[in-house]
Amino acid sequence: MIQINFAVCDDDEIVLDAVCQRVHAIFKRCGVEATGVKYLSPVKLYEQIKDGEKKMKYNLICLDIDMPKLDGVSLGKAIRENSPETDIIFVSNREDRVFDTLLNVRPFGFVRKNNFSSDLMDTLRAYIVSKIDTNHYFVIKTDNNSVTRSLRVVDIVYIESFRDHQFIYMQDGEKIDIRMTMDELERELSKYDIVRTHKGFLVNLKYVQRIDTKGITLPGGVVAGLSRTKVQEVRAQYLKYLRKTGASLISN
């Protein structure tokens, strides 16, 4: 059984209770064992997730946007910096700030308070599926094609080409030298949301932190190349990926 440790932050106590209860109920209905913590103060939540001996770790945090002292977008950025493995879902009426959250926080989803029940159900179902459907494997050969390995696709962060070699960079920091061409890798991995951003780079959209004209920022401050001719295409692919994994990120 999946186990989820989640937190909800909203400065309205009635809304806070309602969101927490509904999130817990949906997880239970879907067979997920979940434990939730409520925060009326965004500052208190920030203090809890900061680096330190008493740092709290959550799989998922649901945030309002309009909150005193520290708004949800700023708090989301702080969560990203201190706990990059934590997923974030915004629960807010501020649909005008959807793209602000995309650019700065990369949330899993955006739940509209005026369509709360439907949006939350869709988004949490997508979230649960994303946690289950992570067992796709990609078979490669290393060491002059003499050693065969099976890699979990979800753990591939990016692939970089250097002369006749392609290097796969894994989530755990491992760097793997293989001999497949970038075109072959692109054909094999595109169905898993790993996209060609540059002739020398393939990037897993799961790990994208920022897209701008300088490139694509990945965990650890790595910047993958992004061709000028591919900027709009890659942004569109990323938005499509977010819509797929967070069903109600963009309103219909």
Image (cartoon, rainbow, N blue to C red):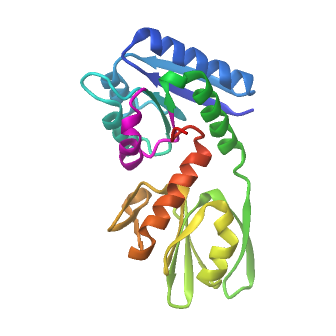
Q: What is the x, y in percent for residue 64?
A: 40, 26
Left or right, 49 with reference to 69: right
Residue at point 72%, 48% (across, down): 133
Q: Quadrant of the C terminus?
A: top right
- Which of the two residues, 15 or 170, is positioned nearer the viewer here? 15
In the displayed orientation, state which residue is furthest to the front. Answer: 252
Residue at point 33%, 67% (across, down): 213
Q: Quadrant of the N terminus?
A: top right
In the displayed orientation, state which residue is furthest to the top. Answer: 14
Q: Which residues are magenta?
A: 93-110
Which image quadrant for residue 2? top right
Residue 146 in magenta stretch: no
Q: What is the x, y in percent for residue 216?
A: 41, 64
Examine the rendered structure and indicate whether residue 151 appears above or below residue 95: below
Residue at point 38%, 74% (across, down): 228
Examine the rendered structure and indicate whether residue 213 appears above or below residue 93: below
Residue at point 65%, 39% (across, down): 126
Residue 104 in magenta stretch: yes
Q: What is the x, y in percent for residue 67?
A: 31, 23
Which image quadrant for residue 159? bottom right
